[in-house]
Amino acid sequence: MRLYPMLGRFIARQHSIGKERMRRGALNVGDNAGGMDSLIARIGGHARLAEADRDALGALIRGNVRSFPAHRDIFGEGERPRAVHFILEGWACRYKTLPDGRRQITAFLVPADLCGIDILMLREVDYGFGTISNVKAADIGVRDFAELLDSHPGLARAMRWNEVVDASIQREWMLNIGQRSAYERVAHLMCELFLRMRSAGLAADRSCDFPITQSDIAEATGLTAVHVNRTVQALRGDGLIELRGRRLAIADLPALMSAAMFSDSYLHPGGPDGGSQADG
Amino acid sequence: MRLYPMLGRFIARQHSIGKERMRRGALNVGDNAGGMDSLIARIGGHARLAEADRDALGALIRGNVRSFPAHRDIFGEGERPRAVHFILEGWACRYKTLPDGRRQITAFLVPADLCGIDILMLREVDYGFGTISNVKAADIGVRDFAELLDSHPGLARAMRWNEVVDASIQREWMLNIGQRSAYERVAHLMCELFLRMRSAGLAADRSCDFPITQSDIAEATGLTAVHVNRTVQALRGDGLIELRGRRLAIADLPALMSAAMFSDSYLHPGGPDGGSQADG
DNA sequence: CGCGGGCTTGAGACTTCTCAATGTAGGTGG
DNA sequence: CCACCTACATTGAGAAGTCTCAAGCCCGCG
């Protein structure tokens, strides 16, 4: 009944990794209005925003851009966060930890993703939120955010859509961790992240930035870093992926998807139901 | 790299189990207005509802009660569901399956729980929803539901709270499946379900109905039925629980919680932030 | 009384983990 | 500009948690 000691899993992550990653992993979004606009347009996946909504959101975002170094908490477990974070550049993650240090990453956030909509209702969050790489994000204060949603029902709806998709991804991750083998899990994660990067407009033909380490993959899939390493090698050996230097290239996407039993329907690529129904 | 064949895992579940479970597992909620009112009042955990909201919801619920036999799909994966389901009696679950039949239960629903709020935005759900025991539930059609939320912002807020808590529970399950040992996982699940039953007013001092089988526990925790069995025996042997005949008794709740590293904060027992903020 | 679902048990197999050491590459300080 | 340091990737070997397969058992139900 005893579990593995896992002493090595709790690694302090308070150092800043330096500029190398910044340089190599930089996403071409920068401050150019075009890039940011395109990200804003993508909010909530494919929820189409009216121009007025997009402008209001864009103004708030542009006025609150902040930079975070890699491996830094944006807010910790149990805290009461005071802002919603819209990722503009770099990757972040949500995570939860056990008292003995074991850690589960519950979500990766890539540009155009949003974290913290729930803070409008929550006294304190049950998860932590931190950066993976260097991150540029817009911090929108609770009050501003609430006003924004109040005056722009279309945005409120987009935010709700965002949460619906997040929940769907979480369910798929449960299926991943609970039922798939190590090989399938890692393959599935790579499919998902590549497709999400692509739909954010951040993937070349068959590759994208991939700033997470094998340890991060381990914490997201419920595996060990060592075993992830062997699994990645197997995926390489099978000619499915190439992975080095914070960059992922998918050598054979159909084969990878099939190995992972991946279906993109849980990402709801079609966007919200355009439907007639009200949104509360 | 091959995974276990797991041939035995895909068990057809289309037979009805008979009345035994109904009789023994029946929750004392029945049609008595008192019980139902108290459930309605509990919707969204502890979101306090105004009287008008409660009445409107109650009317809609009372007018749409339906019964489902045990082990029956209410809607399947990929379908477009046309109603929100409010559980009045019995247990249900959300699940996802892999093409080869492996199945992950992603949530258990007990009385006062709600399923399908997301159908206002989703074209098709990425999960299935089915009964565990015999279930009595209120089916509220999409149109009725949308109108209800439109005209009762307090209810809309309660529904949103419900989704926030659901997402939080899902995250905890990811931590459970990804990081905890078998022993801890099963212990954790039992803590959660007992507490949720208790907060629905459906637990005696230290016991509650527990209509799920060990196979269900296996599918929810990412374990095997055989291993769950041995784990349950270990929990019994350690004097933490008693489990037989669809009834769970917690012999030593503090010890069980500690063994599971259980903290109830993720259930957000304090309810939503009463706060000043708008809710979109 | 016999059937079926669910619970138990036993034995062996296998995926994944732990422990521990080595390799690599960039970043830093002298 | 070269040692050194740190984070990360890799490898090897053995341990162990969990799984598979295969029976038996129990008990309520028809």
Image (spheres, coloured by chain):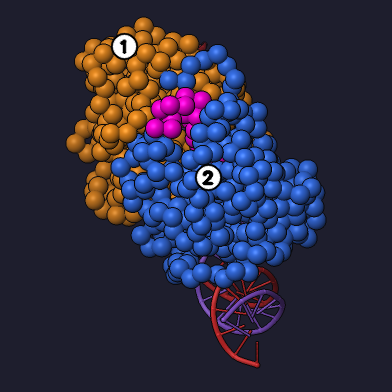
Chain colours: A orange, B blue, C red, D purple
Outermost left residue: A205
Q: Are marks 2 and 1 in contact (CB under 8 Å)?
A: no
The answer to whether any part of residue A69 appears in the image is no
**Mark 2, residue position:** B62
The answer to whether any part of residue B201 appears in the image is yes
Give the label on residue A20, or none: none
Q: Position of residue B109 (x, y in %)?
A: 55, 48
B166 or A81: nearer the viewer: B166
Up the image or down, B215 lies above or below A109; here it is: below
Q: A239 left or right of B142?
A: left
Query: Is disc 2 placed on a helix, strand or loop?
Result: helix
Up the image or down, B174 lies above or below D20; here it is: above
**Mark 1, residue position:** A56
Query: Is disc 1 placed on a helix, strand or loop?
Result: helix
Chain identity of mark 2:
B
Q: Residue at x 58, y 38 (%)?
A: B40
Magenta portion: prevailing SS class: helix
Residue span colored magenta: B147-171
Q: Position of residue D25 (x, y in %)?
A: 70, 81
For residue B48, what is the image quadrant?
A: top right
Check residue B153 for magenta coloring: yes
Q: Residues within 10 Å of mark 2 (few under 14, many from 20)?
A: some
- Amino acid at pointer 1: Ala
- Amino acid at pointer 2: Arg
For residue B100, what is the image quadrant?
A: bottom left
Q: The N terminus of chain A lies in which quarter of the figure?
A: bottom right
Q: Residue at x 25, y 38 (%)?
A: A270
Q: How many marks?
A: 2
Q: B176 left or right of A181?
A: right
Q: Residue at x 34, y 36 (%)?
A: B121
Up the image or down, A49 lies above or below A141; here it is: below
